[in-house]
Amino acid sequence: MQTQKKIKDLRQILRTARSQGKSIALVPTMGNLHEGHLQLIRQARDRYDFIVCSIFVNPLQFGENEDLDAYPRTLEADRESLRSENCDCLFLPTIKEIYGNGLEQQTSIQVPGLTEKFCGNSRPGHFEGVATVVTKLFNIVQPDAAFFGLKDYQQFLVIRKLTKDLALDIAIHGIETHREKSGLAMSSRNNYLSQEQREQAAGLYRCLQSCAKKIEQGNIEFQQLEQAAKKELQKASLEPDYLQICDADTLQAASTETRHIAILGAVFIGKSRLIDNIRFQLS
């Protein structure tokens, strides 16, 4: 596996791969790789010839009081994991390499319609930072495809929309959430949790499952279900940030006509904020 820190060096490698007729896939990450990330690499490896994984803790998507400095960084373990999955290239840029003119002077990308609520409301500027760095990575790598985990479902829809809106010729693949045995969605921020908190945090997924089951059984009193689910979370010592039953394609509140449903949830536990979702189709 090659490691490149400079855009110009990465582009030279990619020019060579393309000249050999190889298809290219990108897996953007912020590092601290877990099994969920590695599943993205495996899916990319199964479908494409040359795999680039980027590790970049993007300051533009962190708010003033968020965990940028504390965000877990495990570079050597990440390198070993990527080697074991036969990743072809690790792109490891510095902040200066990505934002050479500084964050204040950076051209930014906004994606209206999907970013105003949920994580966008709780973390102002977050999705602008995500959209900007992903667009930059797309322009740097110019991949045939990119892979993202569906745990961050709102983020996935934002990236899919910006790709379409900007007419980028990139296939966007969403890969199902990888979970711990308890059902807790794998996340780098799980490292902040004690074992007891991990067990408590699994209550978020159980709550989503319970809510989905009630809908599938015919209960379409969505607002009542949301309120009941929030109370269930609080009983599990999880403080809800949001929990809403949505149209899975638009993230608008679900109606009786909605067939493709997503239930999105975010909770606070200790110093951590965790997100999860469940999606299903009604007949």
Image (cartoon, rainbow, N blue to C red):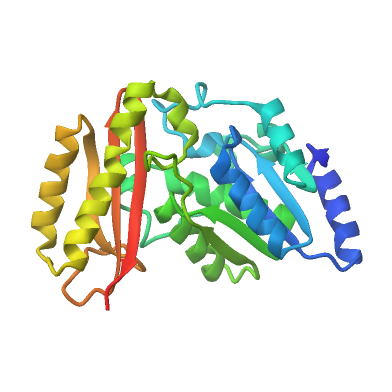
- The residue at the point 87 percent across, 59 percent down is 17
73 or 135: nearer the viewer: 73
In the rendering, at what x and y percent does residue 72 appear? 54, 26
Q: How many callouts does the rendering have? A: 0
Tell me if I can see residue 108 in this picture.
no
Image position of 142 (left or right of 266): right
Answer above or below: position of 102 versus 211: above
Which residue is found at the position 87% from the left and 68% from the top?
Answer: 21
Q: In this view, does 19 lie above or below 275?
A: below
The answer to which image quadrant residue 4 occupies is top right
Asked whether 168 or 192 is in front, the reply is 192
- Left or right relative to 31: residue 154: left
Residue at the spot x=16%, y=43% of the render? 230
- Give percent across and percent down for residue 115: 37, 54
Seen at 42% across and 33% down, the residue is 63
Q: Farthest residue in the front direction?
A: 181
Residue 89 placement (x, y as % from top left): 79, 45
Residue 197 picture location, percent across and down: 32, 25
**Image-based side of 177 in relation to 51, left or right:** left
Q: In which quarter of the image is the C terminus?
A: bottom left
Residue 251, by quadrant, is bottom left
Q: In terms of image quadrants, where is residue 215? A: bottom left
Q: Is residue 265 above or below residue 23?
A: above
Give whichever of 39, 101 is nearer the camera: 39
Locate the N terminus by quadrant.
top right
Q: Can see residue 174?
A: yes
